[in-house]
Amino acid sequence: MADDMSGVLCTKNHEYAIQKEDVLKVGITDFAVEQLGDIVFVELPEAGATFQKGEVFGTIESVKAASEVYLPVSGKVVEVNEKVQSEPEIVNNDCFGEGWLVKIADYDKADLEDTMYYDDYKDYLEQEEEEVV
């Protein structure tokens, strides 16, 4: 996992977004990977597809379950990580690095108001865990 998580924004659905210039790199968090277990299949949209915030943009299947992946912002897919489609285990090994899913442009920065920084996301997970127990 990357050492500097300060620029990582996370959603309550366990997706992340990392802003780099005018593009957002989107994937699933380490918590989502841990919950899913060994990922065996990743289905992603074509580059050029547009989505609204909260819409399903892909599916990840593991040995345990299939899970839909939601886009944290409205925007246009400008790049798809083809490598994770042919080698889905990359997501298990490096979800914040090589295991990203799509890159989004033309997105509404206001959509990011519903995200939380990684440290706050970790706190959120702890609170959720306490409520379950």
Image: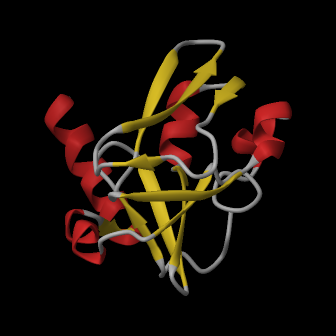
Q: Quadrant of residue 23?
A: bottom right
Q: How is the image coloured?
A: secondary structure
Residue extending farthest to the bottom is: 21
Vertical position of residue 89 compared to residue 116: above or below: above
Vertical position of residue 21 compared to residue 104: above or below: below
Observer able to see residue 128: yes
Residue extending farthest to the front is: 48
At 48% across and 81% down in the image, what residue appears?
6
Left or right: 2 in relation to 115: right
At 85% across and 32% down in the image, what residue appears?
86
Q: Position of residue 72 (x, y in %)?
A: 35, 55
Q: Quadrant of residue 83?
A: top right
Observer able to see residue 88: no
Left or right: 52 in relation to 81: left
Depth order, front residue of 57/13: 57
Quarter of the image where the C terminus is located: top left
> In the rendered picture of this protein, how many numbered marks are placed on residues?
0
Quarter of the image where the N terminus is located: bottom right
Q: Position of residue 58 (x, y in %)?
A: 52, 33
